[in-house]
Image (tube, rainbow, N blue to C red):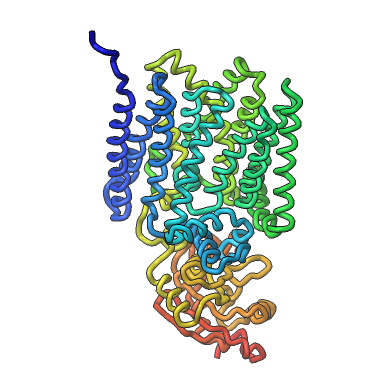
């Protein structure tokens, strides 16, 4: 008699995902080359590459006959592949705005061995050393460059985030199939592919946040395990401010649900103790270690709420037009709206499912509330200042969506196998495309020619050469005045300490002063007293409008009406002012040395 038939599922899964991974990677590379060369169909190639892998991965993860080890392998493969788009975007060095700040901070710790050093690019970065100390330690131990050490840390964090969502779902639903589907659904949030994979403190902090919630749930059932939760809370607080605040909010929601639903008293006491520990740690850190954080975050929150309110009255506050001047194809723009409809329908179905079947499970109800917070944040995407905060909040609220929609998806698959699988895979594709399109503009996702005023394409060989020249001839650590984009390069690769202006230190007034008119004496006094030695002028400010509509900082007093905010005379006047001496000129970039010994000169604000 023939022996028992061997299950070849693992072999078929490995073969299909390997083939899909290779084909997907080829399509992603082709998409980047098409965008870089300016011909072809980069959007179609990108989504062909993503979906040719993620849809088979979703099939194998949601298949009833798939074993636990095979599901784990599928999730590891999914996490690894989903990091590929960001890795291909900039494999050799920082590219996004904040990446330059984190690269500089990690490099300084590696070279000087000191934490909490001030960062001139993002001023609060130095107060949250979790990511930078980890990257510098990996670099020191392995001999990797700072960038490659960062990639190792970030890929590990991305993998842990995916597995953490699965473990959290397993803790709540006690079903491996539901856990795997929850992890895949969480990967649909708009931050997953590009934002939470960048060299930024939130990329590590989000993974810590997920595992803190895992530790919280386990501590509720066994209070003796609360120590791990405390350690993870501390690590999160030391890594990122917004994630620490998000941790408090999610823990508070879960704690309230545990408190109002029937259950052991020990669980309620443990939940409140850990939540108050998170509040105390975060408050203490923000007050005594990172007191600048409130001032850093306040303009974004305050202005976004004002703009959101102004959308409903004639107050002069304007909203945003989604996909205004976007090069994204029409179908990608449409799916951005369809994805929100899909999320709403799924949440309504999940709410009914949770209420009917698990209404006594406080953690499920808590996740339902967390997921519901996703939809109010969608409104803030329509405000210029609130858009960034809305996108960042989705990484938190989408966890709730993932954890309550996953058991509904499993129930549908069990009841209507073929039809449900088809509908769910189509919905999966629509939401993945739509959320990514809504969350990240094409310049973040694809390479291309330099674009003035872009957060991802503003770096040019000319600016890099100027920063190298200043570092080589004048040294590092120089205090310089610059615009946002020059300051980014001079402050990172150049090793200088740039200032790009603020309400309390409006260095942009140096540029705004009309030829022959004085620069405000108070500002000159500040520059002299604080030992600023150099001025960087990018003459493109007189001929081009920044892609993100910012020359210096969010609150700059410069009209954004589609025309350049400066005249060429405003930017060339420094050739004639007695207190600036030109030491470098490459055409677009000029560098001047301040000579404040002439502060008393009668023509200090005028020309020679």
Quadrant (top left/top right/bottom left/bottom right) for the N terminus:
top left
- Residue 526 location, quadrant: bottom right
Above/below status of 62 relative to 103? above
Question: Residue 501 lies in what quarter of the image?
Answer: bottom right
**Residue 258, position in %: x, y?**
71, 27
Outermost residue toward the left in this view: 1
Q: Give the answer, above or below, for where 151 lies relative to 116.
A: above
Q: Which part of the image, by quadrant, shows the C terminus? A: bottom right
Percent across and percent down for residue 133 are: 56, 57
Residue 156 appears left or right of 258:
left
Residue 110 horizontal/vertical position (percent):
52, 64
Q: Is residue 455 visible?
A: no
Q: Name above or below for residue 260 compared with residue 297.
A: above
Determine which quarter of the picture holds residue 449.
bottom left
Locate residue 239 relative to residue 336 in the image: left or right: right
> Looking at this view, is 400 or 546 the one in front?
400
**Residue beneath the point at 62% across and 18% down:** 358
140 is higher (above) or lower (below) than 268: below
Residue 269 in view, yes or no: yes
Camera-side residue of 354 and 514:
354
Q: Residue furthest top?
A: 1
Residue displayed at 28% across by 39% down: 23
Q: At 68% from the left edge and 51% from the top edge, which residue is drawn?
A: 302
């Amino acid at each position: 008699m023939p022996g028992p038939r061997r299950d070849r599922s693992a072999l078929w899964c490995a073969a299909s995902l390997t083939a899909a991974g290779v084909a997907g990677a080829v399509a992603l590379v082709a998409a980047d080359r098409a965008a870089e060369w300016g011909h072809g169909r980069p959007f179609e190639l990108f989504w062909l590459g993503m979906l040719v892998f993620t849809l088979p991965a979703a099939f194998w993860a949601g298949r009833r006959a798939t074993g636990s080890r095979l599901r784990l392998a599928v999730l590891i493969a999914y996490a690894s592949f989903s990091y590929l788009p960001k890795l291909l975007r900039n494999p050799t060095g920082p590219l996004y705005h904040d990446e330059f700040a984190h690269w500089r901070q990690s490099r300084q710790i590696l070279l000087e061995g000191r934490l909490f050093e001030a960062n001139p690019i993002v001023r609060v970065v130095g107060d949250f050393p979790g990511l930078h100390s980890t990257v510098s330690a990996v670099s020191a131990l392995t001999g990797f460059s700072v960038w490659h050490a960062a990639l190792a840390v970030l890929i590990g964090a991305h993998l842990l985030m995916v597995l953490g969502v699965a473990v959290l779902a397993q803790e709540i639903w006690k079903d491996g199939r539901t856990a795997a589907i929850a992890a895949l659904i969480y990967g649909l949030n708009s931050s997953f592919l590009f934002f939470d994979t960048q060299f930024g403190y939130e990329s590590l902090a989000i993974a810590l946040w997920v595992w803190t919630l895992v530790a919280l749930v386990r501590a509720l059932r066994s209070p003796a395990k609360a120590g791990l939760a405390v350690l993870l809370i501390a690590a999160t607080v030391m890594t990122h401010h917004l994630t620490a605040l998000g941790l408090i909010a999610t823990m508070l929601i879960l704690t309230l649900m545990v408190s109002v639903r029937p259950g052991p008293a020990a669980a309620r006491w443990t939940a409140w103790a850990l939540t108050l520990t998170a509040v105390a740690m975060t408050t203490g850190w923000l007050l005594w270690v990172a007191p600048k954080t409130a001032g850093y975050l306040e303009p974004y929150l305050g202005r976004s709420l004002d703009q959101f309110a102004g959308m409903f009255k004639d107050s002069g506050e304007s909203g945003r037009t989604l996909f205004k001047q976007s090069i994204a194809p029409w179908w990608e723009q449409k799916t951005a709206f369809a994805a929100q409809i899909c999320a709403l329908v799924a949440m309504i179905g999940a709410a009914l499912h949770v209420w009917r079947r698990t209404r006594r499970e406080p953690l499920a109800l808590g996740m339902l509330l967390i997921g519901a917070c996703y939809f109010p944040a969608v409104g803030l995407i329509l405000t210029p200042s609130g858009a960034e905060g809305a996108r960042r909040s989705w990484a938190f609220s989408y966890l709730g969506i993932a954890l309550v929609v996953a058991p509904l998806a499993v129930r549908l698959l069990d009841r209507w196998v073929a039809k449900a699988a088809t509908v769910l895979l189509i919905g999966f594709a629509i939401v993945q495309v739509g959320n990514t399109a809504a969350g990240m503009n094409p310049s973040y996702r694809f390479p291309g020619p330099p674009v003035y005023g872009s957060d991802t394409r503003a770096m040019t060989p000319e600016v890099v050469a100027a920063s190298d020249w200043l570092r080589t001839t004048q040294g590092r650590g120089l205090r310089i005045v610059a615009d946002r984009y020059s300051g980014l390069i001079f402050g990172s690769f150049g090793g200088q300490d740039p200032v790009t202006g603020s309400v309390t230190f409006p260095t942009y007034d140096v540029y705004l002063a009309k030829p022959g008119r004085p620069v405000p004496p108070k500002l000159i006094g500040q520059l002299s007293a604080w030992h600023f030695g150099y001025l960087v002028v990018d003459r493109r400010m007189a001929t081009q409008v920044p892609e993100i509509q910012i020359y210096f900082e969010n609150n700059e007093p410069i009209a954004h009406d589609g025309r350049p905010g400066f005249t060429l005379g405003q930017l060339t006047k420094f050739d004639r002012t007695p207190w600036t001496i030109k030491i470098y000129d490459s055409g677009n970039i000029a560098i001047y040395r301040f000579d404040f010994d002439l502060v008393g000169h009668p023509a200090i604000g005028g020309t020679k």
